[in-house]
Image: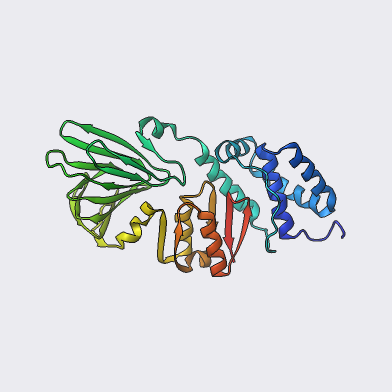
Amino acid sequence: MAADQPISKELRDAASRWVTARDAGTMTDADEDELAEWLAADPRHASAFAQVESYWRAMSGRQVKSALRDRYGIAASRPKPRPRRSLRWMGPALAASLALIVIGAADDWPTRLRADAMTATGERRTIPLSDGSVVQLNTDSAIAIDYSGNRRVIRLLKGEAAFTVAPDRGRPFTVEAGGGSTTALGTRFIVRREGDETQVTVTEHRVRVAWPAPPEGSRVVPEGEATRYGPSGIEPAHGVDAIAIAAWTHGTLVFVDRPLGEVVAELNRYHPGYMRVLGSDLRARRVSGGFSTDDPVSAVDTLQRTLGIRSTRLTDRLIFLHG
């Protein structure tokens, strides 16, 4: 076929995989030979490769390539064909997404130095404490432990954790996060930091949530309810599906009538890359389902098939869902 014919989506995807693998610096001699054969097999292959390479060069440079290689270990993979669709938006979207990945790729040394326990993206970890209490750390989370004298204090430095508290009337159990605190009045609760705000969900008994800024002071939150605190104070407690919120502690994410944009954003917390829904109408589309925290890419595949939508991928590290 003539070299000036339009470049198909499957060729662009194949070229993307080769460019990513090459610039990650992980290709073997055999891979290099295979790439050379692929480029020589059809003039359109070389055209697609040049186009993707121009995107990559414009948005990346050494910092992006080094971060992708060091953080994610991107390796060469054989090109996989995908459905045809327009890629006119790919340049700006990839540039923004790679910028986010690079920002997150650097090790969080300030948190690491303060933490007694941390998890990587996609990792969950159970930490037994000396008093018999248990902490379950969710993805990309960190805590510092301060057990001294008559106090038991856990500082949630980032992320999310579930706490199962051993009773000890002489030593209150308190979780400090985001400038506020949550003190156990029972057994089990979950604390999640999201920017300037912190969400507290009670799955057993009660907790007392305190925020230092007046006039709120503190609120008691009962089982099956949640609250949120931050610069605007403490919200009134309200009923929630605590079982669904706590499902991650068993390796599952449960969504009931949630916008697709929120679902994919939550899945992205467990994904060592970047996933995004393009288009406000598609982001607002309501979905329900249950997915494993161990394989967010498969969850996105399921959403794609179920909803009849499409995706564009620069390997499975960068995924864009669109109509």
Above or below, 230 against 303 in this view is above
| Quadrant for the C terminus in the image | bottom right
Task: Report the colour scheme.
Answer: rainbow
Q: Quadrant of the N terminus?
A: bottom right
Quarter of the image for residue 110 reads top left
Task: Kindly tell me whether residue 138 is visible in this rendering.
Answer: yes
| Near-viewer residue (39 or 211) | 39
Identify the image quadrant of residue 75.
Answer: top right
Residue 322 in the image: above or below residue 33: below
Q: Residue at x 47, y 55 (%)?
A: 267
Residue at point 70% right, 50% down?
A: 78
Can you give x and y, in whole percent of width and height, for residue 266 in the image? 44, 55
What residue is at 53 percent from the left and 64 percent from the top?
A: 303
Left-right relation of 18 to 211:
right
* Snapshot quadrant of residue 61: top right
Figure check: 29 above or below 287: above
Q: What percent of the width, then of the height, locates residue 298?
A: 54, 57
Q: Position of residue 154 (x, y in %)?
A: 27, 39
Q: Is residue 206 left or right of residue 241?
A: left
Choose between 193 and 118: the one closer to the eye. Answer: 118
Give residue 166's position: percent from left, percent from top: 20, 44
Q: Please say whether residue 216 is visible from this viewpoint.
A: no
Q: Residue most toward the right?
A: 2
Residue drawn 34% across the image and 57% down it: 245
Q: Report the label total.
A: 0
